[in-house]
Amino acid sequence: MNFSSKHLENAVASFSSLPGVGRKSALRLALHLLQQPQEYTQEFVETLATMRLEVQECDTCFNLSDSNTCTICANPQRKRNLICVVENVRQVMAIEETGHYHGLYHVLGGVISPIDGIGPQNLNLEGLISRVEQAQETPEIILAISPTIEGETTNLYISKQLEPYKPVISTIARGVSFGNDLEYADELTLSRSISARLPYATQHNY
């Protein structure tokens, strides 16, 4: 692409650095902003800057939040003894979209993957163990991790770490096909997988 403006070229380069945004799409976005009133563009930029500065991780579940405690953890209507363990915040959003889950969450921040240099120490596992240890009643832990080899490895590791505390451990039903990423499952499949979850121990011989 040939640009008559260095500023436009820089904007296109910035947009195209975003996941899934090619150069043509980046140019379309940049030109759209140029065609808007100055106030619109200023508000757009300020919104992004505020998001980057203010959004943080929940101290309890590691979901995204505007304060130390996210709205889900702070909601008294949520089932306190039900914790759904997921890889990332996108999966929290996917499950919330189903409207069929009313417990809490715990975001690991990834899965165990030695090839990628990700071990248990790189995940938010200590917080999960602490929550189970301090639970006032026996909690149920739903392992809603994408059904991949790395996901299954993570499930097994978590179940072993939680074994001394004797929680109820279940996994989502296999309406979600093995090898698929959880966040791309449709709402009906995902809600059925949560509702029809299975005891984890019955699926593995160890």
Image (cartoon, rainbow, N blue to C red):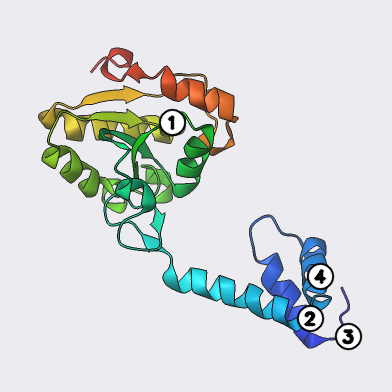
Q: Residues within 10 Å of mark 2 (few under 14, many from 20)?
A: some
Q: What residue sits 18% from the left and 27% below the top?
A: 167
Q: Position of residue 128 (x, y in %)?
A: 24, 43
User: Which residue corresponds to mark 2?
Assistant: 8
Q: What residue sits 39% from the left and 19% below the top?
A: 197
Comes first in the chain, label 1 or label 2: 2
Can the viewer see residue 178? no
Q: Nearer the viewer, mark 2 or mark 4?
A: 4
Q: Above or below — where is 7 with respect to 135?
A: below
Query: What kind of residue is marked 3?
Result: Ser
Looking at the rendering, in which quadrant would you find the N terminus? Answer: bottom right
Q: What residue sits 41% from the left and 56% below the top?
A: 64
Q: CA distance from mark 2 to mark 4?
A: 11 Å
Q: Position of residue 23 (x, y in %)?
A: 78, 65
Q: Nearer the viewer, mark 4 or mark 3?
A: 4
**3 relative position to 49: left or right:** right
**35 relative position to 134: left or right:** right
Q: CA distance from mark 3 to mark 2?
A: 8 Å
Provide the secondary structure element on which disc 3 rests: loop
Q: 117 or 103, which lies in front? A: 103
Q: CA distance from mark 4 to mark 3?
A: 17 Å
Q: CA distance from mark 4 to mark 1?
A: 43 Å
Query: What kind of residue is marked 1?
Result: Ile
Query: What kind of residue is marked 2?
Result: Leu
Comes first in the chain, label 4 or label 3: 3
User: Which residue corresponds to mark 1?
Assistant: 149
Q: Position of residue 151 (x, y in %)?
A: 41, 34
